[in-house]
Amino acid sequence: QVQLVESGGGLVQAGGSHRLACTASGRTSRIYSMNWFREVPGKGRDLLVRLRLNDGNVWYSDSVKGRFTISRDSAKNTVYLQMNRLKPEDTAVYYCAAGSSPGSTDAWGQGTQVTVSS
């Protein structure tokens, strides 16, 4: 089992930057990918970023490409989501998720609220 804990949510002004963190514990050796999603009430949960751990390959959704960056600190079992040029439409609950195989999401964090004020 893998456990994930997110941190770093908060209130940010439009145009600003913010960083989220997600720390994994448990059977971290089984993690194939680390992912960031976000959810807006009534709109479902959308995949934003996927980091493949074996080769560092990263996929970004068009909605965040060029503004958000995922990074990893292997020693701390932590991934970060650096969010720049934030927009009010980035307001959401952000979740990290770990997958054990391609395309899977097997463990989820508790979610952290990010609110971008205009």
Image (cartoon, rainbow, N blue to C red):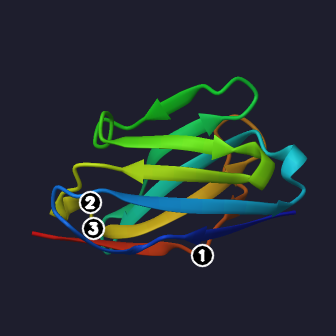
Q: Position of residue 91 (x, y in %)?
A: 27, 67
First reached walking from the N terminus: tag 1 or tag 3: 3
Q: Mark 1 = which residue?
A: 110
Instruction: Write the residue at 62% across / 51% down.
Output: 79
Q: Secondary structure at mark 3?
A: loop
Instruction: Write the residue at 52% across / 73% down.
Output: 111
Q: Mark 3 = which residue?
A: 91
Left or right? Give the position of 115 relative to 57.
Answer: left
Q: Position of residue 33 (x, y in %)?
A: 68, 41
Instruction: Write the residue at 22% across / 49% down.
Output: 85
Looking at numbered disc 3 in the image, what kind of residue is underneath it? Thr
Looking at numbered disc 1 in the image, what kind of residue is underneath it? Gln
Give yes or no for contact between labels 2 and 3 (Cβ–Cβ under 8 Å). yes
Count neighbours of disc 2 (C-alpha within 10 A) and say few if under 14, some if 14 to 19, many if 20 or more. many
Q: How many marks?
A: 3
Left or right? Give the position of 41 relative to 88.
Answer: right
First reached walking from the N terminus: tag 1 or tag 2: 2
Q: Is residue 21 above or below residue 101?
A: below
Badge number at residue 51: none
